[in-house]
Image (spheres, rainbow, N blue to C red):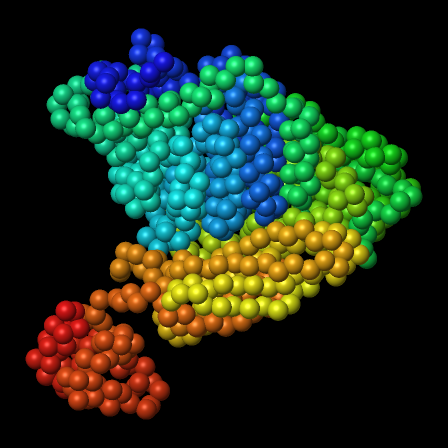
C-alpha cells in the first residue's frame, strides 16, 4: 500500500491535528488517510505502558516489563556497548506492545546531588552521558523503534520545574548543558527530542526558537521530530513557530491554531513543516508497528538486566580485603532493603518488573545460609529498640555483616528535590550499633542519587555503591559480594564530603521562579579538582578485586588540532577483570589558559576486559573539541594553540601517566579593538606585528620591568596608550584598520 508521505497532501485541519496528540499516550491519526494513532510511552530503563493503554493512571501501575538499571546505575558501567544491548532489548519489548517511541533517555547534567530526577540522568559530565546514551539510542532504534532524547534543555531540578527560568551563560550552556545533546544528535540521530518544562534565560524551552530551530536544526542539522514534555506547552502558537512538532498531551486547541494560520500568526509553510515531522515519524515506525507475531525471550532480557546490574555497582571501600567473602564465612544480612529492594526511581519511569530478586533470596539461591534482621523500617517512623537489638544479635553471631542501607522512595523521586544528601538517621544509628558488636561490616547502598558517606563510613570495612539496579539487582549484589563477579563500576559523579562543598550549594534550587547557574562551567569534578576541594570519592573512582598497570603512553599529533593517544594496560592481579581507562586534557601553557578553564576535563574513555597477566594496547583520538572552549565573543568553539597535558587516569584524582603535547590550534582570533588590552594585542601575532611596525616598537619598549607597573600597563586598553603618550591617535586608528582587514 502507498502511504501518504508529504504533509502537503493533507488539508490544513489535518496538518494541525498532527501537531497535537490524540490523547495522553497517542499521536493523532487520520483514519481515512491511513495515518495510524501510534502510541508513545515512558521509559527509559524499561517499558512503562498503562494497562488500559490510554489513561495516565497510577504511576505505580503498568504492564509487566523488564526493569533494567536506571541511568544512575548504568552510567557507572562506563560501557556504551552494554547500554546498546539494553537498548536493543527495550526496542524488542516495544514491538509486540505497539509502542512507536519510548520516552528516553534523559541526559541532563547532575548539577546538584539533590536533584529529584538524578536517578534517571547519567552523569555530572556530558561526555559520559553522551557516549552511553548514544549506545542506548542506537540499540533501541536498531529495532525500528524511536527514542526521545530528553529533557532539552537545562532540566536540572524538580523544584518549580514547570516554570522556573534556568539562567545560564552561553559558555556554560554550550560546554555543560547542551554538550551531551549535541553529541547524541550528531552521532545517534534520535528520532525525537523532548523539550523540557523550564525556561532558559527567560524563554520556555517549548517556545524557544533559538533552542529548537537555530541550534538544534540549524547548527546541529537535526532532522527528527521535537515533542513537548507532558504539559510543557504554554503557548501553542509560539511553540509551533519555535519549531515544536508535537504537543503532548493535546490541549484541544486545533480550531484556534487554524484561525491563527488564517490570520498569519503561523505561516502555512511553518505549519506544514511541523506536521511533516510528525508524519515522517509515523511512517518511520510503520515497519515495526506492522510486524505480526513478534516475540522475544523474557528470560534473556532478565539475564541482560543482571549483567547490567553487575557492571553498575561501584566498590568504594575494601579495607582488610573483606571482600569477596570467603567460602565458609558466616553472614548476617541486615536491613529491610535486603528483602524489600529499592531497585528503581519514583515517578513517571516506574516499571512493573517481570521478575524481582532480593539480596536475601539471592544468598539462599547461592547456597549461603544467612541470618537476617530487618534492622529498620523504610517509613519515617521512629526506630524501635527491638529492631536494633535483633540486628545486633545477628551481627554478633556471624563472621561478617552485610548491611543494606539506602534511600526509601519517599526520600527521592520525580516531583521534588531533596533537602539534603543524608541517609535516614535511624539507619546510621543501626550501623553504629552493629559495628560495635562486629567490626566486619560491609555496607551496600541503594539510592538513586549521591548520599553523604563522610559521617559514617568509618564504621564499615567494605562499601558498595549499588545505586538502583533494576529487577535483577539482588542476585547481582550477591555475585559481587561472593566474588562470582569482579566489580568494575566507576563513579559517574563525585561523592562530596559535605553538601556545602557542592559549587552551587547556595544557588540551588533558586527562588521566585528563577535559578542562577553562577558556578558556570564548574560542575562536579571540574569544580572539585580545580579548587582542590577534598571529596569522599572522586569522579571516575572504583575499586576491583584485581589490579591494573599502565605503561608506554604515547601522544602523537595527527593534525593542527588533534592527537592520537595510545597506552598499554596490563592485568597484574590474580583474577580476570575490567578496567576503565580515562583520558583527561589539562591546559598547561599561558597561551591555552588565557581564559579560565577547569584543571582538566574528561575527553575520552574505554572499558577493557583483561585476563590474568593479559596486556592490551588501547588507542584514543582526541579531536579539536577535546582542546576547545566556547568563546562567547566569537560565538564558536575555539581550540587554542599551545601546551596541553594528556592524562591517562584511573579516576579524576588518580593520574596513572601523563605527557605534554603542543598543538598548533585552529587559528581563530578574537577581534582586536581599541578597548583590547595591551596584553591582548601583544598575544595576537598579527596585532603584535602591527604595533611593532607602526610604533617602531614603542609599545613593547614602554613596558616597564617593575612587576606591578608592568601588570598595570598590560591590562590597559590600547586606547589608553594615547592618553599616556605612547603614540598618537592616528597610529591607533591605523593599527585598527590594518589588523582588522
> In the figure, residue 35 lies in which quadrant?
top left
Q: Nearer the viewer, residue 420 or 466?
A: 466
Residue farthest to the left? Answer: 730
Residue farthest to the front? Answer: 1
Indicate the position of residue 207 as horizontal and vertical percent values.
28, 34
Q: Is residue 146 left or right of residue 241?
A: right
Q: Nearer the viewer, residue 270 or 620?
A: 620
Quarter of the image containing the C terminus? bottom left
Indicate the position of residue 517 as horizontal and vertical percent values.
39, 51
- Residue 280 in sight here: yes
- Residue 372 in sight here: no
Above or below, 462 relative to 598: above
Q: Nearer the viewer, residue 554 or 541?
A: 554
> In the figure, residue 448 lies in which quadrant?
top right
Please count the marks in the image.
0
**Residue at x 34%, y 61% (from the top left corner):** 638
Indicate the position of residue 707 as horizontal and vertical percent values.
35, 87
Quarter of the image containing the N terminus? top left
**Residue at x 32%, y 33% (from the top left corner):** 206
Above or below, 547 relative to 688: above
**Residue at x 51%, y 12% (from the top left corner):** 52
Above or below, 712 relative to 304: below
Above or below, 420 relative to 345: below
Indicate the position of residue 468 as horizontal and vertical percent values.
63, 37
**Residue at x 31%, y 12% (from the top left corner):** 33
> In the figure, residue 72 lies in which quadrant?
top right
Amino acid at each position: 500500500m502507498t502511504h501518504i508521505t508529504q504533509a502537503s497532501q493533507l488539508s490544513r485541519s489535518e496538518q494541525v491535528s498532527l501537531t497535537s496528540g490524540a490523547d495522553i499516550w497517542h499521536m493523532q491519526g487520520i483514519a481515512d488517510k491511513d495515518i495510524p494513532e501510534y502510541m508513545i510511552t515512558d521509559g527509559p530503563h524499561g517499558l512503562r505502558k498503562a494497562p488500559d493503554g490510554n489513561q495516565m493512571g497510577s504511576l505505580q501501575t503498568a504492564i509487566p516489563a523488564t526493569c533494567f538499571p536506571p541511568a544512575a546505575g548504568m552510567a557507572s558501567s562506563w560501557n556504551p556497548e552494554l547500554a546498546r544491548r539494553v537498548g536493543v532489548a527495550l526496542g524488542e519489548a516495544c514491538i509486540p506492545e505497539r509502542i512507536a517511541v519510548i520516552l528516553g533517555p534523559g541526559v541532563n547534567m547532575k548539577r546538584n546531588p539533590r536533584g529529584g530526577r538524578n536517578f534517571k540522568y547519567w552523569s555530572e559530565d556530558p561526555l559520559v552521558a553522551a557516549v552511553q546514551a548514544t549506545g542506548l539510542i542506537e540499540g533501541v532504534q536498531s529495532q525500528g523503534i524511536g527514542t526521545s532524547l530528553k529533557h532539552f534543555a537545562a532540566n536540572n531540578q524538580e523544584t518549580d520545574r514547570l516554570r522556573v527560568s534556568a539562567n545560564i551563560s552561553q559558555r556554560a550552556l554550550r560546554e555543560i548543558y547542551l554538550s551531551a545533546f549535541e553529541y547524541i544528535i550528531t552521532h545517534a540521530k534520535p528520532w525525537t527530542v523532548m523539550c523540557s518544562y523550564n525556561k532558559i534565560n527567560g524563554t520556555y524551552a517549548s517556545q524557544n526558537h533559538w533552542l529548537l530551530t537555530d541550534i538544534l536544526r540549524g547548527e546541529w542539522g537535526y532532522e527528527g521530530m521535537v515533542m513537548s514534555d507532558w504539559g510543557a506547552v504554554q503557548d501553542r502558537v509560539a511553540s509551533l513557530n519555535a519549531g515544536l512538532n508535537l504537543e503532548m498531551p493535546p490541549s484541544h486547541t486545533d480550531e484556534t491554531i487554524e484561525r491563527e494560520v488564517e490570520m498569519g500568526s503561523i505561516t502555512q509553510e511553518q505549519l506544514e513543516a511541523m506536521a511533516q515531522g510528525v508524519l515522517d515519524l509515523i511512517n518511520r515506525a510503520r515497519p515495526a508497528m506492522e510486524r505480526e507475531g513478534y516475540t522475544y525471550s523474557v528470560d534473556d532480557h532478565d539475564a541482560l538486566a543482571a549483567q547490567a546490574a553487575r557492571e553498575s555497582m561501584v566498590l568504594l571501600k575494601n579495607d582488610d580485603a573483606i571482600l569477596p567473602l570467603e567460602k565458609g564465612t558466616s553472614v548476617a544480612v541486615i536491613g529491610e532493603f535486603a528483602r524489600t529492594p529499592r531497585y528503581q526511581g519514583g515517578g513517571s519511569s516506574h516499571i512493573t518488573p517481570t521478575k524481582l530478586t532480593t539480596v536475601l533470596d539471592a544468598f539462599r539461591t547461592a547456597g549461603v545460609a544467612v541470618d537476617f534482621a530487618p534492622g529498620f523500617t523504610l517509613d519515617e517512623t521512629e526506630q524501635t529498640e527491638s529492631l536494633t537489638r535483633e540486628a545486633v544479635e545477628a551481627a554478633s553471631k556471624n563472621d561478617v555483616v552485610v548491611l543494606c542501607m539506602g534511600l526509601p522512595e519517599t526520600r527521592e523521586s520525580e516531583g521534588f528535590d531533596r533537602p539534603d544528601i543524608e541517609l535516614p538517621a535511624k539507619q546510621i544509628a543501626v550501623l553504629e550499633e552493629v559495628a560495635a558488636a562486629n567490626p566486619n561490616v560491609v555496607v551496600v547502598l541503594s539510592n538513586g542519587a549521591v548520599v553523604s558517606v563522610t559521617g559514617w563510613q568509618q564504621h564499615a570495612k567494605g562499601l558498595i555503591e549499588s545505586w538502583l539496579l533494576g529487577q535483577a539487582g539482588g542476585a547481582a549484589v550477591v555475585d559481587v559480594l561472593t566474588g562470582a563477579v569482579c566489580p568494575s563500576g566507576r563513579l559517574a559523579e563525585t561523592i562530596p564530603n559535605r553538601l556545602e562543598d557542592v559549587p552551587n550549594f547556595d544557588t540551588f534550587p533558586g527562588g521566585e521562579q528563577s535559578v542562577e547557574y553562577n558556578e558556570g562551567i564548574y560542575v562536579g569534578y571540574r569544580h572539585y579538582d580545580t579548587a582542590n576541594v577534598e571529596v569522599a570519592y572522586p569522579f571516575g573512582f572504583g575499586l576491583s578485586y584485581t589490579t591494573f598497570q599502565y605503561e608506554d603512553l604515547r601522544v602523537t599529533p595527527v593534525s593542527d588540532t588533534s592527537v592520537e593517544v595510545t597506552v598499554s594496560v596490563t592485568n597484574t592481579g590474580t583474577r580476570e577483570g575490567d578496567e576503565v581507562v580515562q583520558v583527561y586534557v589539562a591546559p598547561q601553557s599561558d597561551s591555552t589558559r588565557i581564559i579560565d578553564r577547569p584543571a582538566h576535563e574528561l575527553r575520552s574513555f574505554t572499558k577493557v576486559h583483561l585476563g590474568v597477566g593479559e596486556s592490551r594496547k588501547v588507542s584514543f583520538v582526541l579531536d579539536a573539541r577535546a582542546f576547545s572552549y566556547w568563546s562567547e565573543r566569537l560565538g564558536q568553539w575555539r581550540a587554542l594553540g599551545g601546551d596541553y597535558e594528556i592524562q591517562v587516569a584511573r579516576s579524576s584524582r588518580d593520574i596513572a601517566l601523563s605527557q605534554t603535547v603542543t598543538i598548533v590550534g585552529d587559528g581563530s582570533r578574537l577581534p582586536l579593538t581599541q578597548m583590547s588590552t595591551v596584553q591582548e594585542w601583544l598575544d595576537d601575532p598579527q596585532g603584535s606585528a602591527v604595533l611593532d611596525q607602526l610604533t617602531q616598537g614603542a609599545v613593547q619598549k614602554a613596558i616597564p620591568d617593575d612587576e606591578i607597573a608592568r601588570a598595570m600597563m598590560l591590562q590597559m586598553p590600547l586606547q589608553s596608550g594615547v592618553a599616556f603618550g605612547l603614540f598618537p591617535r592616528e597610529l591607533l586608528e591605523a593599527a585598527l584598520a590594518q589588523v582588522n582587514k
